[in-house]
Image: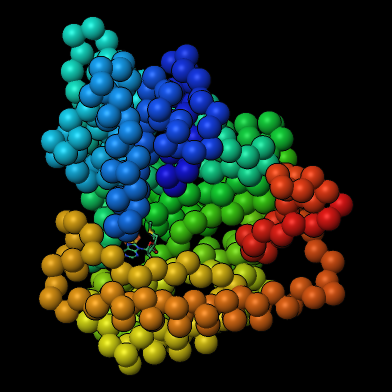
Amino acid sequence: MNVSDSERLEGELQNMGLEKIVETNPKRGALNADVVLVNTCSIRDHAEQKLYDQLGPVAARKRKGEDVAVVVAGCVAQQEGEALLRRVPEIDVVMGPQYVGRVNELLSSATERGGHQVVATDPTLIMEDISKPIRGSKVRAWVNIIYGCNEHCTYCVVPGTRGIEQSRTMESILEEVQTLADDGYKEVTLLGQNIDAYGRDFTPKRSFAELLTYLNNNVEGIERIRYVTSHPRYFSDAVISAIANLDKVCECFHLPFQSGDDEVLKNMRRGYTFDSYMRIINKIKTQAPDASICGDVIVGFPGETEEAFQRTLDLMEAVKFDNLNTFAYSPRPNTEAALWEDQIPDDVKSERLQKLQRLSIQHATERSERYLGEVVEVLVEQTNPKNSDQVMVSKHLDIELLFIRI
Ligand code: SAM
Ligand code: SF4
């Protein structure tokens, strides 16, 4: 979602007549630019620390009297607000994720004559983005379908930083996807923090399954539709059957489970159990036996015992995920679990993470073996920048990238 926001920010800045500096090292780029924008993530602590590293050299330029504007966007901006200006007084604009489409007006009011520092973090209605994002790929594109999150998982900053759910209309999503198809894109990934909540803020309500069917049946030219991320509490049979049956929708289920232990899940406030999660997996395996199943998992949540951790491994054994995003719990500001006393020591977290990652790689390898000897359809994305004899492709069923010699 942050990558998608960055593409939109870049589009907005280009509309203002600014040009991107071609520089792979952001620190060196920041030494030459007239405007430096850092789009931030605060999902875990080390992501936040990166911001302060990035800002150091720009702030030093400004202290020397150079004319450079500094914008901090994204979730750290939302979370810290004015406090960021106290920590780094050289910043001109602090703007939360809901203001992505308004970066030009914020930057202008901070930099025009008589301008002043701007903090844009009040909740706001996300305006439809009419500008063209500068997309990072020519074949795959991100399309937001719902912003924000109304859940209250006790470890997570997202509801605080991205605000309440705001769905985009089915018609405006279709228009964006059709424009992408007309521009030659072959694949779209629909984005939402809790994609299964799509349309529940409308009257009459809409659903994610309805949207999938609507896009599948009305877009000409797009060959693959993917999505992230589902929430097991809201995941419906209608979504399983849409993914299993619609020809353009990839048979890839992204269903974060976070833990296999019921007590930990309750403390995370996730609203499902080991058994109810497995009931969903069994339905998926019955209706779409060849589908890929991916997930997210956190180790070292406060109070996680060795036995509880073992149940997470048990769940992995029961599912055998094609791919897992694995995280060590990171206490975050303004979240409930960060204040609990039964925090797990870092060395235990990292030991559990390593053990879990070994198992995850073993399962992913076992799952990949089902393709041995098979001929599958792939999407050619680009040539390998390091070897022009190779192209980079992704398979229909999961998002592993492969290099294939041509
Ligand atoms: N909305 C998705 C869901 O409900 O599963 C997840 C969105 S979150 C941006 C992506 C992943 O980051 C989560 O699934 C979780 O595994 C991880 N995550 C979130 N907060 C975390 C924290 N405080 N520490 C470690 N990992 C975290
Ligand atoms: Fe965070 Fe996802 Fe829970 Fe929302 S549903 S609070 S984004 S983990």
Q: Can residue 327 be seen? A: yes
Ligand 2 shown in quarter:
bottom left
Q: Where is residue 169 in the image (x, y as percent from the top left)?
A: 45, 39
Is residue 334 placed above or below 142 in the rendered structure?
below
Q: Where is residue 262 in the image (x, y as percent from the top left)?
A: 31, 84
Is residue 250 placed above or below 190 in the rendered structure?
below
- Residue at x 23% of width, y 7% of height: 113
Residue lying at the far front in this picture: please name it. 64
**Position of 298 compared to 374: left or right?**
left
Is residue 135 placed above or below 357 in the rendered structure?
above
Number of marks present in the image shown? 0
- Residue at x 36% of width, y 86% of height: 309
Q: Position of residue 4 (x, y in %)?
A: 48, 41
- Residue at x 53% of width, y 55% of height: 227
Residue lying at the far bottom in this picture: please name it. 307
Q: Can residue 130 be seen? A: no
Is residue 301 placed above or below 125 in the rendered structure?
below
Instruction: Please tell me which residue lies in front, 288 or 189.
Output: 189
Q: Where is residue 31 in the image (x, y as percent from the top left)?
A: 40, 28
Instruction: Please tell me which residue lies in front, 320 or 68.
Output: 68
- Residue at x 63% of width, y 40% of height: 137
Query: Which color scheme does this rendered protein use?
Result: rainbow
Q: Quadrant of residue 52?
A: top left
**Position of 7 compared to 377: left or right?**
left
